Amino acid sequence: MTVHDPLSGVVSVLVEIARTLESSDGAHERLVHTLELLDQLVSYNRCAVLEVRPSGGHEVIAVPEMSAEERQRLTKKLTNIFQLITEDEEPAGGNGLVAGGVHLGLPLIAMDSTVGILFVERDSDEPFGEDSLRLLSLVAAQLGAYFATLQAANALSSRSAERQLLLIGRVSDDLRNPLAAISNGAAMLVRRSTDSADTQILLERIAATAERCARIIADLTEMTQVGALGAVSFAPRSGDLGATIRALVEEFRLAHPHRTIDFTGSDSAVAGEWDPDRLSRALTRLLSNALRYSPPDSHVTVELVPTDESVTIAVHNAGPAIPPSTLATIFDPIEQRLKHAARGLGLYLVQQIVQAHGGEITAHSTDVGGTTFTMTLPRRLGSRQA
Amino acid sequence: MVFVGPTPDRIDGATSERGDCAPSILFDLLWVALCDVLGNPATASLVRRSSKLAVVRQPQLADLIIKREEFQYRYLLPKGWTSAAADSMAAFRALLDELQPLLIEMTGQVVVRRLSAIPELRKCGLLSADETHSSEVR
């Protein structure tokens, strides 16, 4: 349908589009409704928005509903146009557009950057005129402002998260010294105390609590380093991961002489680019957990499996199964703190370290098979995810 | 480099006979016509893109700067563009050569037809009616 009362019709549609984009509907619904409203300004058979995100991913919202094939054609057309006006290299297959009807396309500009394409297409031979293009440019401007708002909100949110991490880091540092004084003082009193058994128990509790608080603060400090300053503190270098792991296992054997810690894997060098300090910390946490949550007479196993491109390190214990609801969010620090007040941030930190290496970590746990945490790390930085 | 913005006299097409083919005047006309149909942000985006593509052949275009200041776009043109010197005209022509296919890919003939209707561009041999039909895109 095309508006017949030009000025008032156009204004009311533009106002409706502005309201739609500012509404509390989901992002997809807002865009779909905007494109549907656009039909009242610029009559089309198909209309689409290509949104290209700063991360490089993209999404195409198209109306009306169309077949997968048609949608694919439209997506290709829009990505070709986008590449044509933004990238140094020509789109794959040349810059010629895929066959279709007459069309108009405009770049969507947010914060002075091209973030997408607005596109309308007709099946008929009736060409679009200048008025259609002008109206389309008004809607493109609205969409550009909408995407700019989203980008600004995302940036604000990201900065806010960063500030929170920095604040946690500062508070952790501030707490560390007085807590160390409490801890040391309590430990000294425990050693010197000649008071009653009750006093002795109380002092031991104070010392244990202070130690637990110190561990939480250490976790928080490390979390802020990994989360807020990860790029700085992650220092990969060429090295033999096998040697690092074997040395760590040996340390654990010495520290836990009554436990059996098996190591399976090649004795030859496992070359790659890693941050050995960070990976040692990650493995230390996994091994500590494995020892803590398994029966004293059971074995803990560390398995190292190198391939040409990557390395898999699995830490297994025969303890009781982790409940599925816990397992599902075991790397989520917020969920873990909400569900288990006493649980630290250790697994979150392990995951952050693994991800900083471009790898991934999974957890598998059953009553019969026990619990296994498996880290997979690419050997080379170049093969790692951005 | 000189500062240039689309001034009202240029928008009205009140150009002197002598300066008709000065790229600074032609660029003003081009800019105003594009903004009229595409809007300022899209115009800035496409002209920047064309300039980036053409600068390899015409280094002078490195001095064409399009800046956004709050909600307005302003541009700085290469120093020599106030006269119709051969090298300035070549640079402007290279810009148009890159711009035209982009416009056709995106909008078919709508914008190119509009540009070809600008007398100054036609008079200076930069766009002709024949040229606009040479690469029809549906």
Image: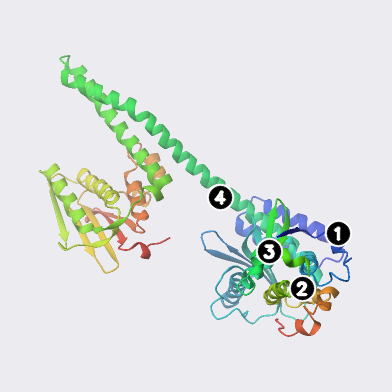
Comes first in the chain, label 3 or label 2: 3
Mark 1–mark 3 distance (CA, rounded to whole Å): 21 Å
Q: Nearer the viewer, mark 1 or mark 3?
A: 3
Whole-angstrom CA distance, mark 3 to mark 4, is 32 Å
Task: Name above or below for residue A316 compared with residue A208.
Answer: below
First-in-chain label (1 vs 2)? 1
Q: Quadrant of residue B78?
A: bottom right
Q: Chain of mark 4?
A: A
Residue A158 image offset from top left, x and y in percent? 51, 47
Question: Which residue is label 1 attached to?
Answer: B8
Q: Mark 3 is on which residue type?
A: Leu
Crowd tier of the residue under label 2, counting other residues whose Cα lies within 10 Å: few below 14, some 14–19, many 20 or above: many
Left of A317 or right of it: where is A364? Answer: right
Q: Quarter of the image for the N terminus of chain A: give it.
A: bottom right
Work out whether disc 3 and disc 2 sit on a shared chain.
yes
Q: Residue at x 54, y 46 (%)?
A: A157
Cβ atoms under marks 1 and 3 closer than 8 Å: no
Q: Which mark is residue B64?
A: 3
In the image, residue B108 above or below residue A289 = below
